[in-house]
Image (cartoon, coloured by chain):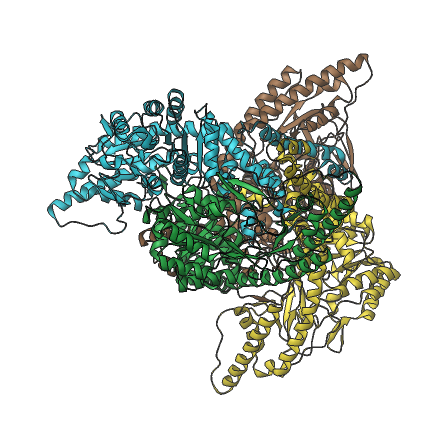
Chain colours: A green, B cyan, C brown, D yellow
Amino acid sequence: MNSENFGLSEKLVSSSYIRQGSQARRSHEQLIRHLLEQGKCPEEGWSESTVELFLSELAVMDSNNFLGNCGVGEREGRVASSLVARRHYRLIHGIGRSGDIAAIQPKAAGSSLLNKLTNSVVLDILKLSGVRSVASCFVVPMATGMSLTLCFLTLRHRRPKARYIIWPRIDQKSCFKAMITVFFFTKNTKSHRNNLLEGDELRTDLEAVERQITELGAENILCVHSTTSCFAPRVPDRLEELASMCAKYDIPHIVNNAYGVQSSKCMHLIQQGARVGRIDAFVQSLDKNFMVPVGGAIIAGFDESFIEEISKMYPGRASASPSLDVLITLLSLGANGYKKLLSVRKEIYLLLAQELKSLASAHGERLLHTPHNPISLAMSLDGLQAESDKAVTQLGSMLFTRQVSGARVIPLDKEQTISGHTFRGFMSHSEAYPCPYLNAASAVGIAREDVTLCIKRLDKCLKTLKKEGNAAQSSPQVLLSGHEDTSQGVTEQK
Amino acid sequence: MNSENFGLSEKLVSSSYIRQGSQARRSHEQLIRHLLEQGKCPEEGWSESTVELFLSELAVMDSNNFLGNCGVGEREGRVASSLVARRHYRLIHGIGRSGDIAAIQPKAAGSSLLNKLTNSVVLDILKLSGVRSVASCFVVPMATGMSLTLCFLTLRHRRPKARYIIWPRIDQKSCFKAMITVFFFTKNTKSHRNNLLEGDELRTDLEAVERQITELGAENILCVHSTTSCFAPRVPDRLEELASMCAKYDIPHIVNNAYGVQSSKCMHLIQQGARVGRIDAFVQSLDKNFMVPVGGAIIAGFDESFIEEISKMYPGRASASPSLDVLITLLSLGANGYKKLLSVRKEIYLLLAQELKSLASAHGERLLHTPHNPISLAMSLDGLQAESDKAVTQLGSMLFTRQVSGARVIPLDKEQTISGHTFRGFMSHSEAYPCPYLNAASAVGIAREDVTLCIKRLDKCLKTLKKEGNAAQSSPQVLLSGHEDTSQGVTEQK
Amino acid sequence: MNSENFGLSEKLVSSSYIRQGSQARRSHEQLIRHLLEQGKCPEEGWSESTVELFLSELAVMDSNNFLGNCGVGEREGRVASSLVARRHYRLIHGIGRSGDIAAIQPKAAGSSLLNKLTNSVVLDILKLSGVRSVASCFVVPMATGMSLTLCFLTLRHRRPKARYIIWPRIDQKSCFKAMITVFFFTKNTKSHRNNLLEGDELRTDLEAVERQITELGAENILCVHSTTSCFAPRVPDRLEELASMCAKYDIPHIVNNAYGVQSSKCMHLIQQGARVGRIDAFVQSLDKNFMVPVGGAIIAGFDESFIEEISKMYPGRASASPSLDVLITLLSLGANGYKKLLSVRKEIYLLLAQELKSLASAHGERLLHTPHNPISLAMSLDGLQAESDKAVTQLGSMLFTRQVSGARVIPLDKEQTISGHTFRGFMSHSEAYPCPYLNAASAVGIAREDVTLCIKRLDKCLKTLKKEGNAAQSSPQVLLSGHEDTSQGVTEQK
Amino acid sequence: MNSENFGLSEKLVSSSYIRQGSQARRSHEQLIRHLLEQGKCPEEGWSESTVELFLSELAVMDSNNFLGNCGVGEREGRVASSLVARRHYRLIHGIGRSGDIAAIQPKAAGSSLLNKLTNSVVLDILKLSGVRSVASCFVVPMATGMSLTLCFLTLRHRRPKARYIIWPRIDQKSCFKAMITVFFFTKNTKSHRNNLLEGDELRTDLEAVERQITELGAENILCVHSTTSCFAPRVPDRLEELASMCAKYDIPHIVNNAYGVQSSKCMHLIQQGARVGRIDAFVQSLDKNFMVPVGGAIIAGFDESFIEEISKMYPGRASASPSLDVLITLLSLGANGYKKLLSVRKEIYLLLAQELKSLASAHGERLLHTPHNPISLAMSLDGLQAESDKAVTQLGSMLFTRQVSGARVIPLDKEQTISGHTFRGFMSHSEAYPCPYLNAASAVGIAREDVTLCIKRLDKCLKTLKKEGNAAQSSPQVLLSGHEDTSQGVTEQK
């Protein structure tokens, strides 16, 4: 309420109480002021009531909520269902304008403010998470893959002659399709060999990359497309070296940082890469890093004008839903709350590693040694494989049925064709990884209980399979009914 | 509750009442059954309680809501903010899978069902709205422009050599950018002349189109990109003829049907075009046709496999938010409710035409005669232009300030450069339309009060400007402060 | 947002848009100002967004929502469940203080304001509905019966010697218990005869009332307890005459106006009664008159100090929930919306009367002639009674099973004992009403469809019973399974 | 969804996923089954989604939500505002029936179930909290005071001749008014002396009570009305001895256990009292014990039939809102969650005691020694009193202004008249307590931060007052502006 209304209230309720109420309101306003002034994620999270007060203030500024508005256009932010209006806090106009997803909308000052502030708060969090020199970013209501596509499309305008993307292999469909959609041949799809096996780890084969660059000619290469977060035993690409190479050959460099914001190591790699060499943009998923629903990503970079160019490439308005989700989440958590989540994740990573190690040794397997992967772990399944041919895939089904989600089982020698390109050893980022294995990850939001339950259920499954295996040697095969798709949909990345 | 729980309840509350309660539950279940069985929009709208019951049933089926789930993956549908979880009805996993936005997610049976049903219900509505032979469609969480881009990208895989899109001029930025993003030259950007002036109307110049096709060579043309809904005096393209031409020359045909679902005329054009010739896909905005928030579109077509190809082109998962909005809305309205909205729109179109006509004649202007445009109307501003140079643009500002939204003013001779291409006479779909004018539209959800208020305020503005004009002739120019952008953001289309 | 924050926003989003947003905010503030200033129900209903904005402003003023509050008391408005906090808009402190349910709470300026405004708005509506000279009222979170009890308890302090309440018979349990709870003998429970049969109507036996007064001695009488809204063929009491009598004998007069606010006739009776004689308080249900959940009532009167006395009799704080419900409802409807509801109710009353009349004559029954009852109607069931002994009660069960709610069937000669007092002819307000009958009412919120469906189902039931009756004469009785309680809970009033 | 609908879903989404979804649904159903079967608070709290699923299932069973219902009664559960419907989960019919607040409603099987289950779950919690032999209880939508009134009114029917209530003094208005409302003289209001000073504590003067009983005659006494939770230095009444006395003299015994459920000591006293003597009913506040909004209470006792008698005394239906709040809260917390809250409260009580002790000694005051009071503490203000006459009351104002809520300051010699009865030394439960003091309490839901902040602010205030006091001795008095009511509304109890 404004001061006039507080004044009137004093006639109804004792003025000292009203004055205290008005002062209480000011403390919410102060938080909002701070946000508007600094454009940063608040240190301490806001209460739900401040968040909702703020959102209702924004909504009031959009023309569809004007009390005296009359609309004779074709897009007036009218909503047929009050359930729908309510769930969007009556912010209906989306974000952006035809020309630019970051543009201000005359009809929707509140939504425009929401958009600006979200991008600003997210930029702050990227800095806090380790990429201190990031210059600009924006939230886009598309998942990581489509966001990478947008980056590639933008680069095409800059490098019309380029025909290739250099891509250290990473076995995630959307990642590969992001390139295919743009209609380029990715050189590496021919070789499939440029991940080096170092100990248990699969790491970037820098020599192979440089060889490809010189073979194809730098001017024919749209960009290098590297990856940070990934499933073990693959580890994050050697970003520093790749970035230096890109600088040397004047080739753009796009980093798929899908769920890397949650890991200081991944963020550090990007920061270092940009410092010593060239990174044009890095793209990360909203849902995987910020615990919001699927469907948004952040496109970020070190050169404001290039990021603006990408934002102008998106033709038309867009859903404000992912922006709204991440803004609510970050205001509610505050920077401290988010940091707390990240440090818990790190702790649980150590717990998971330790528990998997014990479990592995109890079952005659071992935890693969992948120190460069800060999120994902892998446990060998050699013994299980030896047990029976089907056991490895059965393990996947069994875990699915027992509500262990996210654990994925990688058998040997899987072959997969995507848009005409065949990958041998698919899912393992390598044509012939030495052993089958099981992945588990400690991602943001994980709880200790997830680890305990997973280990317990995994233990049971392994014991059951061993018994069945023994039985199977002397008797007919016992087949598990039910779910047959061992991959559980986790081989992919949005 | 299941029958066991109803049974237990009978021990607490008299069994005849519980049995009636259980029967009442069945009537909600019957509605859901009907939906699952038929995949059609229900005739009568559902109550909010059925809608919410249904959504909570879907949510329960997603793994992030499993009571005993343990998650050790990198994407587990965890949500940090309960505000966010709640507003999405705890449906967190989005839609689709890496390979295909229409694919089923193992982790999210409920969200998968939501996705399937939404597409199916939307398909039903497209049929009801006039495109009876539509074969397939899907909702995509991108606005119309980006959705068109996706269609063009898909066509590129089919026609790798094609370099041109034939596009009867329509002055909407996102529309043009949708093509630019894909990196094609659009032949017509050279000429800007292929809209024919017929009376007051601007219509497709069929001869020019055919000439371009033969000049460029059909095999070099990616597609014809036509438009239905548009601002008067531009009228919907001659779809029948264009479709026939596409069939004749074997050129794909993509229709931008942005807000055309709400008009039986636009839908009829598409239906006829597909019957007599070739239409590969038609794209429409969710928000403009279904009164939901900005950010979604429907890609539809007559060949299931081509539509599937487009859906597979989207690399990765996507936000379920637009699907959820449109499903809630259509279940709430029911087919009858939606038809009712459309028939009210049509009535108000007639009212608006009549009122504008009277107003125009009172001010010495005239309502342009554009019978082929079923949604948008235009009133000449010749007199105002004569009054003073600035008057036309001032009118735009004044309407904005007076909360008349969606009315847009088109001055003469505006020039605009988009991505390096210059449009003369921008906003008027023509290099030299004979007069400046004002647009107003009757779009779905409009109320009689919108018309009344708009006419009243417009009348006042025109009177004020006339007075000022008279004053200006004898005294120094009075300048209006405030908003200067006359276009009010309405020249564009998302 | 305050002006400082709007100022800061102008740095992020173009200032003309922000200024328009800020102006839009002012229009909500204006509505709130008007409410605070006038304390009246707004003419036009508020939008949901204004209502929620206002409630969140109120909540911000309560100490449990202060951002810097620390609480070391035993009642701090803490809430364990966010579902609960949310559904009460974080208004947790209830209303009133130990001494007075209308008192202001130092810890809760917002809730206090809510309480004051609700009472003020409700007072306005009572005036608009016909009791123009009402002086004061308050909402109490108790149903009508308990609210009447509170009035009687208050009167006892004024008339410590009084031992009797004069009560023209009305067969509603809670009504009777409201008196029993206070532990008085109600004189009429001895006679049960003071409703006069005039035509079909049962009306106040004024002579009997006066006789009782003189017999018992005015000083021994706590009050006359009369009733307006009631089931036909009982009609509202002759309030004018009763009020005059009360004035003459100096006896307090409490009116049970349970669902009378919705009827201009009932309200007129009260207004007239107060004008010509004495009415100390009149009590009405919130849910029955204002379409809110069960559990609140309004105690109103013509002497502010007496109403205050009652409010001070309530020992302690109370739930704000009914106040919140009725405030939201009245702000949303506006005075015009409420009047509209009332006029629709009246129309449907006529429709119901007409339809029942036709139906009755088709089945050889008749609509009882009860012109003084503006809400409830009764149709004779003589023929049905003749058919078979059980038919009348079976009709009740059948209607219940067919989801006709609120229709109640009154058999002959039902006897009921309440707290030791036996009523002959219970439910019919009379020891021996000439015929059994069925009641139906047109209450606020009723829709035409309710009438149509009810008549259709009633017709079917009557036909079925007739067939069964015929069958029963020649064969063994067919018993209906299921619900046996014919009263359907509608004999009572909260 | 029922099995048929799950079956249909399998045609749309792979059956193994649907089956898992259906299994997930069953786990929610299992929780509900357990609740229905046992009627106990679940050990572990339910997730929000289970709670909401359950509530929506209940709502579906109420006739106002029947899809085919037609209503022709005067109370049909219609709701005008969707905001209101939603916030009550569409449970509109309230609880109870005319005859009995615990009765089942034919129109509302869901609400009836809600009512039964709430009472059952609450009973379970009372047992867990220490009153193991409690036999019956019900939630009533009235605060503690009015609920006590209802108990007294019920007793009047049993003891029509009784004219007195024996009441060991406790200075809380609503408590006293609860008796006055029923219109009894409370014997002790004459003497005001029956609290004994034992050390710093004020305890029940058992001899005085017994003397009064014999003087007045047991048959003239309605009941003994004792108290557990109270402000220090008053401590809980000696329930065991009072209960024995009541048994001996055959006098009913009602215990005001306002916020005693949260303290095992208070609950133990009641359990012991009932074991060795007589307790007819004990009444507790919902909000103070269960962190829900103000406005509900629990009436409980050891004899099912007496509790039923009280519930039948409430004339009419009642609001379901308090029942709904406490049910949501207890299902969400689970028994373990609630126990956790209680144990945290106990810990913080110790912290508060320790911190107040240190603070007191730093300011030359002392923490009063009141070991029998498990919730409330008191710190002397002798020094402050010596400083200046106004200082004690000023401290109250200052704490209010600094958002320390719940801390109350008790000056010496305050006199207050309530309903004609004058209390000397009001607020201190005694005519002449030796010193002024400040109260602070550790109530359920308190956080460590509350204590820290309170101590810090209190320290500052005391320092400021000391300085002012010193200044005042040599210069004119500095007056604090603002709030003057030192009691801050905390002298009372709802």
Query: Can you name the residue that lies furthest to the bottom here?
Result: D474
Q: Residue at x 73, y 37 (%)?
A: B6
Q: Residue furthest left?
A: B474
Q: Quadrant of the N terminus of chain A?
A: bottom left
Residue A479 picture quarter: top right
Q: Where's residue A72, x and y in %?
A: 34, 37
B302 relative position to D227: left or right: left
When the figure is inspected, residue D267 is found, relative to residue C481, above or below; the finding is below
Say if D247 sits above or below B458 in the image: below
As drawn, is C229 to the left or to the right of B358?
A: right
D136, C197: nearer the viewer? D136
Q: Is residue B29 left or right of residue A244?
A: right
Question: Which residue is nearer to you in this view: B266 or C379?
Answer: B266
Residue B471 percent coordinates (x, y):
15, 45
Q: Quadrant of residue A132?
A: bottom left
Of the pair C206 and B356, the residue shown nearer to us: B356
